[in-house]
Amino acid sequence: MAKTPPLDARTLAWARGEFSRYYARAAVPAPERLDRREIALFPFAEANLMRRHTAARSVEELRRYLAAEIPRHVYYSSAYYRHPEAASMAAKEWFGADLIFDLDADHLRGAETLDYPGQLSLVKSRLIDLVDDFLVRDFGVSPRSTSFVFSGGRGYHVHVRDERFARLTSPERRELVDYILGTNIDPKRAVERASADVRSGRTVAVADEAEAAPLGRRGRGASTLRLAPPDAPGWRGRTTRALLALLARWEAEGAPKAASELIGWGADARKARRWAKFLVEEKRSERIRTTLALDVFGQESPEEFLELVVRRAAIEVQGETDAPVTTDIHRLIRLPGSLHGGTGFQVVPLSREAIDGFDPFASALLPDEGRRTTVELLADVRYPFPDGGLVGRVGETVKLATPRALFLVLRGEAALRP
Amino acid sequence: MAVRGPAPPLSGGELYAEYPFLPGAEALVAGEGLSVRALLEGAAYERARVIGRARVLAAQDDPRASSTVQELASAGPDERYLSFLFARLVLSAAPAAGGLRRWAVAEAKRAHARLEHAPSDELEEVARRLGFVFAASPKLVRVDLTDYVRLASPIREAEFRLASQDLSGGGVFVPAPRAARLLQEAVRRELAVPVPLTAELLAAVRVRESELLADVARRVPAAFERGRARPTTMDRGRFPPCLRRMQRTLERGENLSHAGRFCLASFLHRAGADFETIVDAFRGAPDFDESITRYQVDHIRSRDEGRGYEPPECDTLRSHGLCARDGDPEGPEPKDRERDPLCYEPFLKHPLQYYRLKGGVSRDGKEGDRPGPPAPKGRGGPGAPSR
């Protein structure tokens, strides 16, 4: 939960002092139904012991508690309890929980090779996909009952407060997560068998899945394969959209790039080059994009191509979220408005509109009040803070605005000068 | 089953006779001044009781309701309704919940046989009366997302996973047969809960129907061993809290998820349980089927030349909602209800690791050091076929 490098007693006392200045004045907002939530915290201490099972009846009580305790990390329960302060789960009496999604660079595909700022911007783009594409479009979640929070660390949290979801059990929430992650989806559901209606001359989609699904079947008269409409519900439409985007990209990048990508996914080299030529140079790809028809393969069966490419396209658009966070109905989650003890960033509540333009380096750090702190760098650092960023080499001694010094010290990348 | 066309629309009375669990079905017998006492004792209801008993016993032997109950087929609508009420009354008074749960599975299956061929407005109506929002259109039925996951999560077939549905704007669009299957689950849930009875009535039912209740108790497969002592190295007291909770779930006759069933079977095997002991662990499942369980347990055991499948590690159990390290509020003993500190040790990654640390002996000693094989696809866990 809280991964923070060990700090010595003097550093802890200094950092705690900085946090105390914040909590003395901060108007930390109350989570909805605060009096039903458990509050838990990690103090500034060498032993990493969590203090749990407290509750606050009002926002004033919460703020007094934070000002007195000066926690390094503070959490509240996504769950609602009759007795949030009780020491055991049984005595707490669970009666519901927000639906929580956690996107964190630690769990994101493709994040391993990025630096911290790069990770943050990748997480943000996946957050927007999660919210707009999955939660709003598919789950029908209202943005009004949803809040978005920058975690202060490597990611974002989404809190959905909606009566309909509140009482879902863990396995029921697992279904929602599996949907987002695309667990065990069959991408070929995005391929329909359209049959020519002889009387009307129109092509009609075969709605019955049992008839539409099996691609291997041949000789069904005048039937052809085509993609589900891009606005088809669920993974069918999503897969089509991903496939169309992939084809458009290949058209822009040219046949050799398409061929090498196909080979990278495991296609036979000779076939890959033929498909790429056929799609990109002979412009069949454009025809797929405009008509959705997959009859462009002529005599050749498209199944092998579809198996490879449709699957790949679906993988591209799989959602991201940390599954155990959503399925845990007793989860403790970082308190919005508090400070993250591993960065000194504020845990910032955001509206959906604010997400796109949000930059933690510009707006999550405590304001510069003119105080300076001298630190020795323990690593090469490069962070895109405003006004030229924060850049330095290991071993250098630098005088920094105190919030920036706090950021580096808490991350273990700088030490206070003795 | 023979393919039938859509069933003709039902009148109110017929609807209740087909779906006697629906609130409002009392209207069927409204003129009769029916009391629970009368149903239990009155001479006028003898035939209803006879059919009701047949209904109860058939469910115990055949919870999947694959054969028809003869007495039921020849009864009129009000007799069918009364026999249903009687069955529910008696099983609600049973000391163990297993009988009621098996009966709920059978009655739900029976309702499904009708729902499968019902016109979609009938599906809509039955759903509405059970408290679920289904909206039928000519081709598809729209089910509210949260209702869908509630009803579909206990169903194990892969085609019911949410990720395979057409989901949009908070609605899941399913073909009518799939909606019928969801309603089967709704009926099962409705009926698996005992109706509240006063202490006096409870005692009266137990006395008058003692023979039937004894018969039910004999027919419900016992959860775990039926007093047979088997030589085994397994020590249940050393199991981690998650496994103990899974066992309690089945012993109470409640449904355990596929992931839970897979974990329990693979864990028991590694913990030294023999084949029969593992099979017995699933007898409490409301949909227990002996031959299918034997087949599935055998499959799990024989993996890797008898090492068996690797039970899932703690992370996986957590993500499936199976972890119980915070304590199980419904646990019988204080140690079940409390948080288990060993589970919070950073090094603890695997339930078998817990078992060994508590002094248990397992067949192999490497879990937690390496990832296990993936769980089999779909949800065909031991205990039951797809319901």
Image (spheres, rainbow, N blue to C red):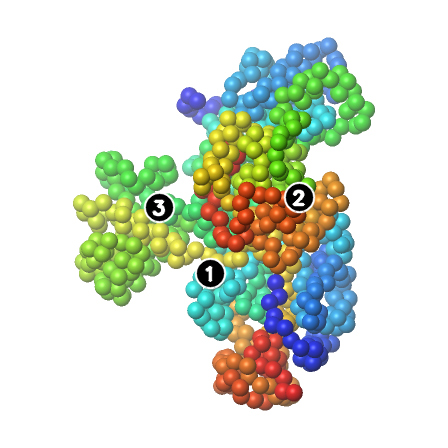
Q: Is residue A337 left or right of A300 when viewed as pictured? A: right
* Total count of labels: 3
Q: What is the C-alpha distance between the residues marked 3 and 1?
A: 22 Å
Chain label for disc 2: B
- The residue at 62%/16% (across/down) is B54
Determine whether the residue tagged by mark 3 lies in a helix, strand or loop: helix
Query: Are labels 2 and 3 assigned to the same chain?
Result: no
Percent of width and height locating residue A166: 63, 50
**Which residue lies under the disc numbered 1?**
A129
- The residue at 43%/55% (across/down) is A318
Percent of width and height locating residue B1: 44, 22
Q: What is the C-alpha distance between the residues marked 1 and 2?
A: 45 Å
- Kindly identify which numbered label has been placed on residue B238: 2
Q: What is the C-alpha distance between the residues marked 2 and 3?
A: 46 Å
Asked whether residue A231 is in view, the answer is no
Asked if the residue under mark 3 is in contact with the one under mark 2, i.e. CB atoms within 8 Å, the reply is no
Asked whether residue B293 is in view, the answer is yes
